[in-house]
Image (cartoon, helix red, strand yellow):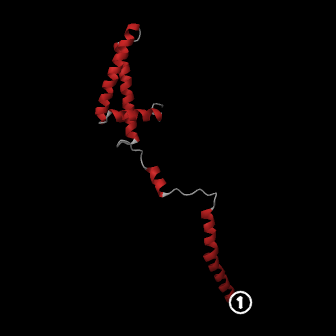
Amino acid sequence: MDSTNLTWKQSLLITIFALVVLPVGCTYVLTREDAEPAPSIEQTTQQKEPDVRNGMSESERRTIFDTLVSAERKARSDADSRFPLTTPENIDQNSELNQELTQEYKANVREQYGITEDVQIKIEVEGVQKGWLLP
């Protein structure tokens, strides 16, 4: 009979432990001040959302930025080929042609991607700020 009472007492202690002590212990673990709070659903969602601006992802804007930089480089190269900077007389002509070609080539890029000049400028500013030119 003692072994039956002991088993009953043990069951009672286990039940009390499970109902009272464990929940309090879990609450302590979950509410410790030194624990970092879990991110909210909103924070998690915001972190996973792509950076979309002007209806384009960052990847698309980077592609346009790279194309604009290539257009500027082509304009510079074409102007240098036509008016080499080896003589003082060519400096003004080179500069004027470079500006004209840059405008023309960037207009082609805008047409190619269906963007406005305002969007082009925003992409250029973003690219410079984020260091997209750097390798």
| Lateral position of residue 134 relative to residue 63, left or right | right
Q: Residue at x 47, y 57 (%)?
A: 41
Q: Residue at x 38, y 42 (%)?
A: 53
Q: Is residue 89 above or below residue 10?
A: above
Whole-percent x and y of residue 46?
45, 51
Whole-percent x and y of residue 122?
39, 35
The residue lying toward the viewer, choosing from 1 and 34, is 34
Q: How many marks?
A: 1
Q: Can residue 87 be seen at all in this image of the molecule?
A: no
The three-letter code of the residue at mark 1 reads: Asp
For mark 1, give the secondary structure: helix
- Which residue is situated farthest in the bottom direction here? 1
Q: Is residue 125 above or below residue 29?
A: above
User: Residue 87's quadrant in the figure?
Assistant: top left
| Lateral position of residue 115 relative to residue 29, left or right | left
| Lateral position of residue 119 relative to residue 25, left or right | left
Q: Residue at x 67, y 82 (%)?
A: 10
Q: Residue at x 38, y 32 (%)?
A: 121
- Which residue is situated farthest in the front direction here? 118
Q: Is residue 14 above or below residue 95?
A: below
The residue lying toward the viewer, choosing from 112 and 12, is 112
User: Residue 75's quadrant in the figure?
Assistant: top left
Image quadrant occupied by the N terminus: bottom right
Q: Which residue is mark 1?
A: 2
Whole-percent x and y of residue 79?
35, 17
Label 1 crowd (10 A; few <14 / some 14-19 / many >=20): few
The residue lying toward the viewer, choosing from 83 and 107, is 107
Q: Can residue 54 be seen at all in this image of the molecule?
A: yes
Whole-percent x and y of residue 34?
64, 57
